[in-house]
Image (tube, rainbow, N blue to C red):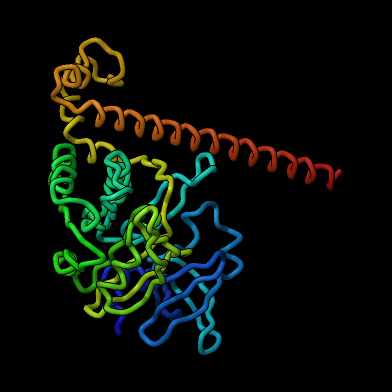
Amino acid sequence: MTLKELGYNESLEKFKIERNWGLFEIGRIIAQHKDRYTIKSPVNEFDAELIGNLRFTAVNRYDLPAVGDWVAFSAYDESKALIHAIYPRTSILERKAVGKSGQVQIIATNIDYGLIVQSVNRDFNLNRLERYLTICNAAGVTPVIILSKTDLIANEELTAIVILITDRIKDIPIIKTSNQTNNGYEPVKSIIKPGKTYCLLGSSGVGKSTLINALSGQVHMKTAEISTSVNKGRHITSHRELIILENGSMLIDNPGMREIGIADTSSGLEITFDSIMGYAENCKFKNCTHVNEIGCAILDAVQNGEIDTEAYANFRKMEKEKIHFESSIKEKRKKEKSFSKLIRKVQNQKDRNKYK
């Protein structure tokens, strides 16, 4: 396997030359286990850790490697390595860190496509689907919807679900699969292209690991038995991992996510809800919040039935999360700035006392 087959390109090579990183080896993070990483290079896989300077100078999560990253590293034996630096990222799939105000959790980096998997029997939730679309749109990642376990419901129910999706979500491919009958795998394989990186997104037990096994033709991910009480297998993926498929494409599996908190400071929400935001151009006030203003075109469209009330409610809920997250970041930065000033003040006082 070559670096190019792993997704390496001219832009990364140019960056390496500009930074004079020619003495380091190049590899891609394919797995992470707390503070240790697995690096894939054309010649080997390495168990790696960060050099001290990289670890101690990291200001936030963005300064640390994630699955999908390209890194500059040095090997110190056949399978051990040290990570010295991270290459620029083309995309970052992220969500609000669970239970941590103003912080993000990076799901994966350098992703081309997000494969959003929902099982149609019990897991299906249109509001959650729009959340996954939002984190994809915020990252500039192309989303694809995969409806799994279609053999567990009647055709009429499946048709109703597809109509429900297409009424609220436009121009996103929808692929219907069955892990039991293997139906739908060929359409998925047709969009998996060499050199591209795909990230599986979805709750626990929707069949992501089973899908990876089917696409690769090998048992890469362990899956538990299907429960007869809830009609779903227990997803036992415990960490993120990048799998290289036979055709040269790369697929990242993730542990199931119960919460998809919005950490969107870009245009992800506007893209996901473009059918709603299109009305905003006709609002009476430019700074309209679309909550209770007289002359709000969005509220008028909801009232007239032009905008789905549930879609509007989900949009408002995520917009509130976005505003709260942005406020938390500002407050956190304000505290960090104040703390830095205090440290400098104390240090200056020590210096003055030293020369008295």
**Residue 229 in the image: x percent, y percent?**
39, 54
The one nearer the camera, 31 or 220, is 220
Point out the residue furthest to the top here: 294
Quadrant in which the C terminus is drawn: top right
The one nearer the camera, 209 or 246, is 209
The one nearer the camera, 174 or 344, is 174
Residue for point 19% across, 44% down: 161
The answer to whether residue 143 shows anywhere in this view is no
Residue for point 32% across, 67% down: 210
**Residue 233 in the image: x percent, y percent?**
38, 61
- Locate residue 221: give its quadrant: bottom left
Q: Is residue 216 above or below residue 349?
A: below
**Residue 47 in the image: x percent, y percent?**
52, 78
Point out the residue furthest to the right here: 356
Point out the residue furthest to the bottom here: 78
Q: In this view, does 253 lie above or below 277?
A: below
Quadrant in which the N terminus is drawn: bottom left
- Locate residue 220: give its quadrant: bottom left
Q: In this view, does 62 lie above or below 279?
A: below
Q: Is residue 315 above or below residue 239?
A: above
Residue for point 26% across, 54% down: 141
**Residue 267 in the image: x percent, y percent?**
28, 40
| Mark count | 0
The answer to whether residue 64 shows anywhere in this view is yes
Residue for point 39% across, 41% down: 262
- Locate residue 176: give its quadrant: bottom left
